[in-house]
Image: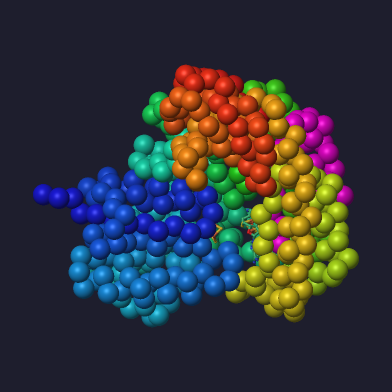
């Protein structure tokens, strides 16, 4: 008999992408198989994000579009992830044809909920501590070359604009042994690149004695790990021991995502970020002095309530001084229930204009940094065909997208030397040095 089929649609951050891989693994364990076809699916789950405005509405539009499928094969239509956690039963009131609502910390309970959803509405939105222990062997990994490993869940910060602490709950940490065993499993199944995941990954601890640097030391010591990355780091808690380890251990990648949010001390205070402009810039200097070739990226919010032109100019100043390789920037979006949502917003057109100026300020910086690679030969882990399909693509150790041509047929998940010929606005272009595939095992260097 043909297996029942499922389809998961994912929005939001890397944690949601990994959660979808976990949900897919659970469903496959129950005897389902994935399908790209909405018409074929018996179970459709929407894994949602609520970090900025409008996603709820987007979810309801999507639900309305899928509704007619319930007359055919579709048995369970579910909303999971951060919108599910936030809206809970209100989802059933707005879309009574939804069968299942499940928050991100309840993934382990999908089998029972699915069973229930076949007869009656199923709702689960507790902040459970067992979610951090989801077994690695049951994850259906969708990334071609990288294994994501959860090290902590939730967020215990109180940034004034942010919904995440409400949707993911307080921080819980995964014990070191459990992280190491998932890492070993991932390596045994062929992954050489590991990315440790957590909303504040560097707040990880195990008991009173082990902190983030110990975690990096232990995971980078697992045999077969050729590239180790981690995200997202909170600047306030980034230990300089971690930067030292990056410099010492060839398999810890020279790349760090260090969200700034604003360059103005006044706005950072209003945001409750727990650092100020000078402190952040000093951290960047300290990290760069230990790892001179590190690539940095950041998140910036423009138009936070109370942001004046002078505040914004301070953000531009930090952006120029920190010299990021990439910036992810967002216009401030008020989130219900957060303290900042009560404040008077900056006018839409002012925020839009500042956002554009931020992009304009960053472009020459990242272009200059990319151009510095021209003529150099760098190591690339092959991910597959490039977007255009005519070339190949992979990433350097410092996380640059490298598009390249090759006279041979490179295999996905192997390391190649690529000579960079030119730089685009966001990526590098080059030519593979060796036509022959190299076995995984080369070192992680830019
Ligand atoms: N834990 C991470 C961030 C997770 S949310 C950290 O502290 O850096 C990802 C990014 O979304 C944030 O870094 C922030 O830049 C952006 N963001 C969060 N809330 C937002 C809001 N209300 N409006 C606009 N951007 C927001
Ligand atoms: Fe949100 Fe701040 Fe927590 Fe990041 S640290 S998830 S921005 S509350
Ligand atoms: Fe979005 Fe939830 Fe991630 S709100 S950014 S999916 S933690």
Q: Quadrant of the C terminus?
A: top right
Q: Residue at x 67, y 39 (%)?
A: 423
Within the magenta stretch, is there residue 284?
yes
Judge left or right: residue 405 versus residue 67. right
Can you give x and y, in whole percent of width and height, for residue 162 in the image? 64, 64
Residue 249, placed above or below residue 82 = above
Extreme left residue here? 1
- Looking at the rendering, the stretch of residues picked out in magenta corresponds to 274-301
Judge left or right: residue 29 versus residue 272. left
The count of marks equals 0
| Ligand 3 falls in quadrant | bottom right
Q: Residue at x 70, y 27 (%)?
A: 375
Q: Quadrant of residue 229?
A: top right
Residue 336, placed above or below residue 442 = below
Can you give x and y, in whole percent of width and height, for residue 243 in the image? 72, 32
Q: Is residue 241 visible?
A: no
From the viewer's side, name the closer residue of 236 and 59. Answer: 59
Judge left or right: residue 86 versus residue 362. left
Residue 215, placed above or below residue 170 = above
Q: Residue at x 50, y 32 (%)?
A: 382
Residue 344, placed above or below residue 268 = below
Can you give x and y, in whole percent of width and height, for residue 319 in the image? 80, 51
């Amino acid at each position: 008999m043909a297996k029942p089929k499922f389809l998961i649609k994912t929005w939001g951050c890397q944690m949601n992408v990994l959660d979808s891989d976990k949900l897919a693994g659970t469903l496959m364990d129950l005897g389902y198989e994935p399908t790209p076809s909405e018409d074929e699916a018996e179970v459709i789950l929407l894994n949602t994000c609520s970090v900025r405005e409008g996603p709820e509405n987007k979810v309801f539009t999507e639900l309305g579009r899928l509704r007619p499928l319930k007359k055919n094969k579709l048995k369970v239509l579910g909303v999971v992830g951060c919108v599910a956690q936030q809206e809970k039963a209100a989802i059933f009131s707005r879309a009574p044809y939804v069968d299942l609502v499940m928050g991100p910390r309840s993934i382990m309970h999908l089998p029972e909920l699915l069973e229930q959803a076949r007869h009656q509405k199923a709702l689960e939105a507790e902040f459970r501590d067992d979610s951090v222990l989801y077994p690695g062997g049951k994850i259906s990994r969708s990334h071609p070359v990288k294994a994501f490993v959860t090290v902590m869940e939730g967020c215990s910060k109180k940034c004034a604009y942010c919904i995440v602490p409400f949707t993911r709950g307080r921080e819980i940490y995964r014990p070191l042994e459990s992280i190491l065993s998932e890492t070993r499993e991932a390596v045994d199944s062929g992954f050489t690149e590991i990315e440790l995941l957590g909303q504040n990954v560097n707040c990880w601890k195990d008991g009173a004695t082990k902190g983030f640097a110990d975690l990096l030391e232990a995971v980078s010591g697992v045999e077969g790990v050729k590239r180790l990355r981690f995200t997202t780091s909170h600047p306030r808690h980034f230990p300089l021991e971690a930067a030292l380890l990056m410099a010492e251990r060839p398999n810890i990648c020279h790349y760090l995502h260090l969200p700034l949010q604003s360059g103005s001390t006044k706005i950072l205070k209003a945001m409750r970020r727990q650092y100020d402009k000078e402190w952040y810039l000093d951290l960047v200097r300290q990290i760069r002095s230990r790892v001179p070739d590190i690539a940095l990226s950041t998140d910036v919010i423009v138009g936070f309530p109370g942001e004046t032109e002078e505040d914004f100019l301070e953000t531009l100043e930090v952006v120029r001084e920190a010299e990021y390789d990439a910036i992810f920037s967002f216009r401030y979006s008020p989130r219900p229930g957060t303290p900042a949502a009560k404040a008077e917003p900056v006018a839409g057109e002012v925020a839009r204009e500042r956002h554009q100026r931020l992009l304009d300020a960053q472009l020459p910086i990242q272009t200059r940094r990319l151009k510095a690679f021209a003529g150099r030969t760098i190591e690339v882990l092959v991910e597959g065909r490039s977007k255009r399909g005519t070339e190949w693509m992979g990433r350097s150790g410092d996380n640059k997208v490298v598009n390249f041509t090759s006279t041979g047929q490179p295999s996905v998940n192997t390391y190649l030397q690529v000579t960079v010929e030119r730089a685009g606005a966001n990526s590098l272009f080059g030519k593979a040095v060796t036509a022959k595939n190299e076995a995984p095992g080369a070192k992680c260097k830019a």
